[in-house]
Amino acid sequence: MRGLFERHIQLTGKVMDLRLQRQNLVTANIANVNTPGYKAQSLEFEEKLQSALNQNALGKMTRTASDHMPTEFSTAGFKGDGLEAFKAREIHGQDSVNLDKEMAENAKNTMMYNALSSIIKKNFQGMTKVIQEGSK
Amino acid sequence: MDFMTAMDISSSGLKAQRAQLNVISMNMANIRTTKTADGGPYQRKSVSFESTPVYSPFAQEMHDQLNRDLHGVKVLGVTADQRPFKQVYEPHHPDANDLGYVTYPDINVVEEMTNMMQAMRGYEANVQTIQAAKRMFQKALMIGNG
C-alpha cells in the first residue's frame, strides 16, 4: 500500500540509526587508543541490508493466506552484525587500535550520515511542495 | 544508542589523555628533583589505562549485544617506575653522599616528549569524534525544518 510516507524514508531512517550505532563503536575505539589489550569493534550491515532488500527484487513468494509470513523487507527487525577484533594487538610499540583506520571511518560515517539526513530533508521538502502546489 | 553515548565515551577519552599529560608534566618538572617527602629522589610515574563499560549494569541489561559492549576508558592508576636512579658525581651538591655522588631520577626527556605527543594526538582524536557527533546531531535536527 502506498501511503503518504514512502517506504524509502523509513529505510533511510534505519540506515541513519545503524550509522549512529557505528559512530558510537568508532568513538569507543578512538577513546581506547592507548588502552592495552582493548579489542577494536566494528559494525557491518551494508551487505546484509542489500541482500535483505533484494528479497523483493528476486520475486515475492506467493502468499496463499494473509496470516503467512510476508516477504517484504521491514526496517523494524533489521540489525547489523557487531564484530569484535579477533585478538587485541599487544605488540610493543603498537597501539591497540588502528587510529588511522578509525579516524577515516569516523569521517566517512559522519559524511554518510549527513548525506542521508539531507536526503530525508529533501524528501519532506518535495512532499511539502506537492501539497502546496497541488492546491493552486 | 544515542548521540550522548558518543559524547560520554569521547569525554572519558579526553579525561584519560589529560591525566596522562598531567603525569608527564610532573615527570618533566621533577627531572632534577633530589628530595621528596618520601625521602630520596623523585621517582618517575606512569599512567595505565583500562577500558570501562559505558552503561550502568542495569542499563546494560536493557540494551542489545552491540551496545552492551561499548567501552569508554578510565585511568586505572598511576604507578611509580622502578628503574634505578642515576648517580652523578657532584661533590658540592647539598645532597651529595660521602663519595660525592648525587642520585637523580632517571627521566629521559625524549621519552617524555614522545609520550606527550602521543597523549596530545589522542586528545585531538577524541575532540574530532565529539565534533563529528555534534555535526551529526545538528544534521538530524535539520530534518524537521524542511
Image (cartoon, coloured by chain):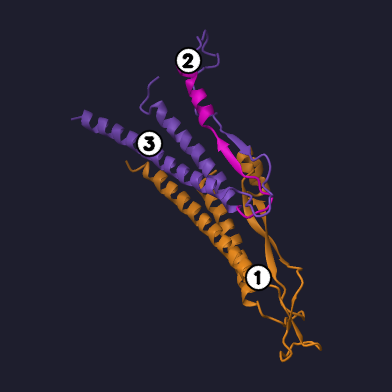
The reply to whether residue B64 is visible in this rendering is: no
**Which circle, 2 or 3, is nearer the viewer?**
2
> Chain A shown in which color?
purple
Magenta stretch: includes residue A56: yes
Vertical side of B106 occupied by B71: above or below: above
Residue pointed to by mark 2: A58
Crowding around mark 2 (Cα neighbors within 10 Å: few <14, some 14 to 19, many 20+) is few
In this rendering, the answer to whether A31 lies above or below A114 is below
Q: Residue furthest right?
A: B98
Q: Does the magenta portion include B75?
A: no
Q: Identity of the amino acid at label 1?
A: Asn
Shade of chain B as shown in the rendered figure: orange
Chain part drawn in magenta: A33-59
Q: Are marks 2 and 3 in contact (CB under 8 Å)?
A: no
Identify the image quadrant of the N terminus of chain A: top left
Q: State the residue position of label 1.
A: B108
The residue shown at (41%, 28%) is: A8
Q: Residue under label 3, please give it.
A: A120
- For marks 1 and 2, give the CA distance: 66 Å
Q: Residue at x 71, y 82 (%)?
A: B34
**Subunit ID for the residue under disc 1:** B
